[in-house]
Amino acid sequence: MSSRVGRPQGRPRGSTEQANALAEFLLTLTSGMTVRELAGRYHVGKTLWGEYRSGQKIIPLELLRRLVRDRTPDERTRQVRMETAARLHQAALEGPLQTPAPAASPSITGPSAALEPAKAPEPIKAPERPPSLEPAPTAGPVLAARAASAGRAASAGSQRPRPLTRNMLNSGGAGIVILAVLMLLLGLGPASSMDTAASAPGAPEVGDAPTAAPLTGTSVFAIGPGGRGIFQWDATRWTRIGAAARQLWSGPAGLFATGMDNLLYAYGGRPGYWFPIGEPGGDLAVSGTHVYRLAADRQAVHIWDGHGTSWTQIGGPAARLYGGEPGLFATDPNDGRIFTYLGRPGQWDFVGTAGASFALTDRHLYGLTPERTTVNRWLAGARPPWVYAAGPADDLYGGAAGLFSTDPSRERLRVLTEPGTDAKNQNWQDIGPAGAEVRVGRREVYVLTQDRSQILRWSRDTGTWRRIGGPARTLTVWAAQDDPGAGRAGNP
């Protein structure tokens, strides 16, 4: 008699009856499979599978549909289950919205503020004996994307172009439309001040199609502790622009957030104005004016069409997406190779072999070798395409301000000096402690401390640190090219 590894799944414990009903359906659908088996087959972590099957999180609709297809061989039964899955998923989304738990950390200036500017601290120079701060947790890249089409075979080498067979991502239909109205009234719509309840933001005029507001200038965006509040720093003060969120992304295309309902939202450009554009999927990247998403089951890469919940498939299976000014890159889930998107669906070019980490500056792609002993820079069209850039590192972070890394001990943050083609003049310069998250701007780098109580900014121009806010759950940074205010200190 065979035995199966893993604990039996307990009863659903979602926040609503609708979420529990969906979880019961999912438990029945995946009966006989452990979370380890589900994670291995669908490339979604074991922890997420446990949360999906317990009702604590709502499974993405596209992943649910794939499960129904895979677990229901009879066509007639499959159709019935598809209808049931769609109905239960819609009901779970339309259930009462979850409210984040109160933050454990106090705000800087009072109990009503989740994120506010610091109280005029003295500039912080990198200390000689800094506190031990661990770097941001990162998912080691496992590379994914399609090889270039037959016309690009010269650079792809041994890659075999594979046809794109996945359907365009389903946007969730009526459930998302109804939820959009609910969220405009209740969800991502904060009041203008931090200490009042969220109010209903203005909806678009009849006939208008909501679009993401392009970002200009320099902005730091952060989510308050416990997911309470989305805030924007404009170099002088924090402004609340949203009610609640889990994660943020930013770039020229705009600001995007995962809501507490696990839907992906775009910021409409004024406080409280957010609209849903689909499900967040397995990864998200912003490059130029485009937003790219890796499906929840990591079997397809899509590009947002710029309106509504419409997405178009541009590539196949991937493990991680990297977006920035040099373009979109994806890593292969099987052998770790990295590819670049050529701008047309199905067309990807081979860039290099597997790496422990990758990062994009405003001009280049950098890769850390699997053993983490060498950082190389990719030069498109050059022979050889990869050249030495720097020595050992634990993780890489890139942006317009340059390339940054944590040292092998994971305690220190460094910047690559004199980036260029002359390798002998390049080295890692220590600038201070690392933190829970590192984000790179135009002429500065932002660090969220390990305990997430402070947001610190280091200026490349002055070489000094300054506290600009906190506490926070997470942050994202965008600085427009050649923005004159990118390096200017605020006056909190």
Image (cartoon, rainbow, N blue to C red):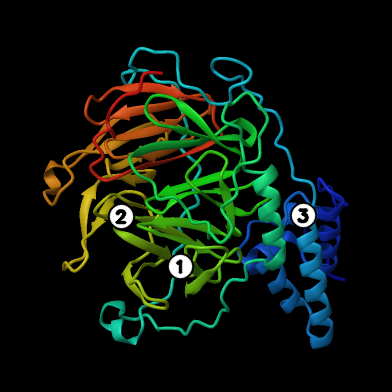
Q: Earlier in the sequence, mark 1 or mark 3?
A: 3
Q: Nearer the viewer, residue 255 or 468?
A: 255
What distance separates the C-alpha of mark 3 from that of mark 2? Answer: 38 Å
User: For numbered disc 1, what is the local secondary structure?
Assistant: loop
**x, y percent for residue 163:** 47, 85
Q: Nearer the viewer, residue 466 or 330?
A: 466
Residue 325, numbered circle: 2
Q: Residue at x 60, y 43 (%)?
A: 246
**x, y percent for residue 484:** 24, 35
Q: Earlier in the sequence, mark 3 or mark 2?
A: 3
Residue tagged 3: 94
Q: Are marks 1 and 3 in contact (CB under 8 Å)?
A: no
For label 2, count other residues whose C-alpha is less than 10 Å away and answer few (under 14), some (14-19) or many (20+).
Answer: many
For label 3, count other residues whose C-alpha is less than 10 Å away and answer few (under 14), some (14-19) or many (20+).
Answer: some
Residue tagged 1: 144
In the picture shown, does residue 410 fall above or below 280?
Answer: above
Q: Residue type at mark 2: give it.
A: Glu
